[in-house]
Image (cartoon, helix red, strand yellow):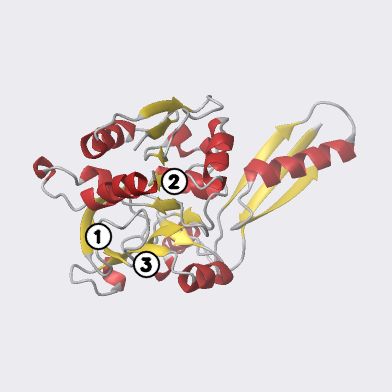
Amino acid sequence: MKSAVLVFPGINRERDMARTLTLISGVAPAMVWHAETALPAGTDLVVIPGGFSYGDYLRCGAIAARAPIMDAVRAHAQKGGLVLAICNGFQIACEAGLLPGVLMRNARLKFLCKDVYLRVERSDTPFSRGYNAGQVIRVPTAHGEGNYVADAGTIARLEGEGRVLYRYVAPDGALDPAWNVNGSTNAIAGILNARGNVLGMMPHPENHVEAAMGCTDGRGLFAGLVEHVARAA
Amino acid sequence: MKARVTVTLKSGILDPQGKAIEGALKSLGVEGVASVRQGKVFDIEFAGADKARAEAALKDAAEKLLANTVIENYRVEVTG
């Protein structure tokens, strides 16, 4: 799997992501600067990593979403190429129109830096084939604006089309407002675009992939992507 | 020319920052505050003297960047 990690000023999770991609796919990703206008030829997966692009000025992700490289990312997605957008990347993807909705300030106004539990709603997508449907995984989260909001029609469409892939739940997998850490609509932690080749999620699966991290629940997401690309080839 | 673009949250969108400010105003004893919604103001110096062109350009700016129209409304005023 050939992957490319976008780098914007103020991003700070790109090296974690590169390390995880190298560990699990066996191939180091290309690091692609925001001012570039093209992705490396043959890129299977584009990752928009987490951080604080442009200091979260204006709105989180708003300025990065208008960077030159984003036209190439939109073209990649339109051709069916995979895009994984994590944390600030999710905010950027929403602002860039790759995904619907918006990430607002956490409902309880606090920056959250803690592990959360996610329920994998489907296993038949490139971003979840490494898991079983209904499985609960523990992954770190670190954000101040992760409260997913969209109009009622969009939420109904996301739910009706099975595009809510990850949801904040209690450790036993039950929906519980106390475990919906940022107050997201329907406890949404991760969504797919209509075609199913773009995933945006707030938590950081790339930070739970090695025993030394205390948990390896994030591996499935990346291992699933590698398997998906290998089978498609 | 001077212009101002005001961006406000659409009604029905939860505004936790506005709520926190509302709570703080009430705890300060400021009377009569029923609710607070927080927004943004952009003061922009516009080159040239064509008011209609300035309005069109600022509307474009608001649509493309200054506002996220999923959750926000905007208003453009060219004050001259």
Same chain check for tags 2 and 3:
yes
Q: Is residue A76 left or right of residue B27?
A: right
Tag 3 secondary structure:
helix
* Residue type, label 1: Tyr
In the image: residue A10, left or right of residue A64: left
Q: Which residue is mark 3?
A: A187
- Residue that appears at 32% across and 36% down: A13
CA–CA distance in space, label 1 to label 2? 18 Å
Query: Which chain is disc 1 placed on?
Result: A
Nearest the camera: A122 or A154?
Answer: A122
Q: Can you tell which quarter of the image residue A49 is in?
A: top left
- Residue position for label 1: A131
Amino acid type, residue under disc 2 in the picture: Leu
> At 26% from the left edge and 38% from the top edge, which residue is drawn?
A25
Q: For residue A168, which numbered disc appears in the image?
A: none
Label 3 CA crowd tier, 10 Å (few <14, some 14–19, many 20+) = many
Instruction: Check the picture and name the quadrant holding the C terminus of chain B.
Output: top right
Q: Secondary structure at mark 2?
A: strand
Give the mark, 2 or 3, whose residue is nearer the N terminus: 2
